[in-house]
Image (cartoon, rainbow, N blue to C red):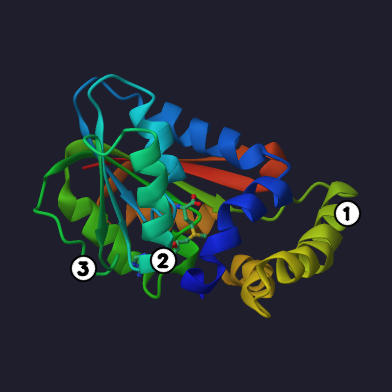
């Protein structure tokens, strides 16, 4: 599915979020409080927008972006090369269930809008804990469901009807943008996901609502 929507993926991200997706990724990078020269894993990196935002944050930071969709990575690689960032961002094809990196080889890790898609989120979190050094920070962005009356109804109409329709027309994919609200509904609510993160090797787990809870930023430290 991600290979099929890759050509229009970035455009749809920016349009459907009214440009907020960039701000959400910046908040995730900020939460990492990166020192210069560290190595960051960006799991489910897709077209590498978060990887690119990360290396711009601090001097000498490098990112390994991992994703299993070759076409998403190919688009990401074109952006990395055109920004002359190929020395600082490495893109690798791999599965979140078996991250192709050595244990304790990363100082920080991110996943933006990816954890909801992996078949076994607990396994992916355990894998991230394995590749992070003790004390290494994790920042996860994932869609939430705003609970504010009024906003909730309007957003729900947008997310369930308008977004899938625009997504289908622009991407020409029949189901990818209907899968989006369906997968968000099926994902555990923030307090439950916080407990899941804590149970997979992390401490100080916190969930920060962004843009009225449309998105949550989860931050945690490797024990
Ligand atoms: C919604 S996209 C997010 C991409 C990017 N992080 C962003 O912020 O735009 C989700 C990505 O997760 C990847 N993905 C899903 N399951 C995966 C898995 N088990 N292993 C690796 N990548 C996976 C998909 O290929 C896709 O590129």
Quarter of the image with the C terminus is top left
Q: Residue 71 carries which label?
A: 2
Question: Is 134 on the left or on the right of 137, as rendered?
Answer: left
State the residue position of label 1. Answer: 154
Quadrant in the picture for residue 38? top left
Question: Where does ligand 1 appear, by image quarter?
Answer: bottom left
x, y percent for residue 11: 63, 51
- Give how far apart the Cα atoms at labels 2 and 1 are: 34 Å
Nearest to the observer: residue 97 or residue 149? 97
Residue extending farthest bottom = 174
Nearest to the observer: residue 71 or residue 26? 71
Mark nearer the viewer, 2 or 1: 2
Q: Residue at x 19, y 24 (%)?
A: 37
Q: What element carries label 3?
A: loop
Q: Residue 98 carries which label?
A: 3
- Give how far apart the Cα atoms at labels 3 and 2 are: 20 Å
- Give how far apart the Cα atoms at labels 3 and 1 are: 39 Å
Q: Which residue is drawn at 21% across and 62% down?
A: 99
Q: Which residue is drawn at 65% across and 76% down?
A: 173
């Amino acid at each position: 599915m991600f290979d099929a929507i890759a050509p229009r993926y970035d455009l749809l991200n920016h349009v459907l979020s009214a440009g907020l997706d960039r701000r959400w990724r910046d908040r995730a990078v900020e939460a990492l409080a990166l020192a210069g020269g560290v190595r960051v894993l960006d799991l489910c990196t897709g077209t590498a927008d978060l990887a690119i935002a990360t290396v711009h944050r601090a001097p000498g930071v490098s990112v390994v972006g991992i994703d299993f969709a070759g076409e998403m990575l190919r688009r990401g690689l074109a952006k990395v090369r055109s920004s002359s960032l190929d020395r600082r961002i490495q893109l690798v094809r791999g599965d979140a269930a078996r991250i192709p990196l050595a244990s304790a080889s990363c100082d920080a890790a991110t996943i933006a809008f990816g954890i909801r898609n992996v078949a076994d989120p607990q396994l992916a979190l355990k894998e991230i804990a394995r590749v992070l050094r003790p004390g290494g920070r994790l920042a996860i962005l994932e869609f939430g469901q705003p609970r504010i009356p009024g906003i909730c109804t309007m957003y729900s109409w947008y997310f369930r009807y308008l977004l899938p329709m625009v997504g289908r027309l622009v991407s020409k994919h029949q189901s990818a943008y209907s899968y989006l609200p369906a997968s968000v509904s099926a994902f555990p609510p923030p307090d439950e996901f916080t407990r899941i993160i804590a149970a997979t090797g992390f401490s100080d787990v916190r969930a920060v609502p962004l843009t009225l809870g449309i998105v949550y930023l989860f931050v945690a430290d490797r024990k």
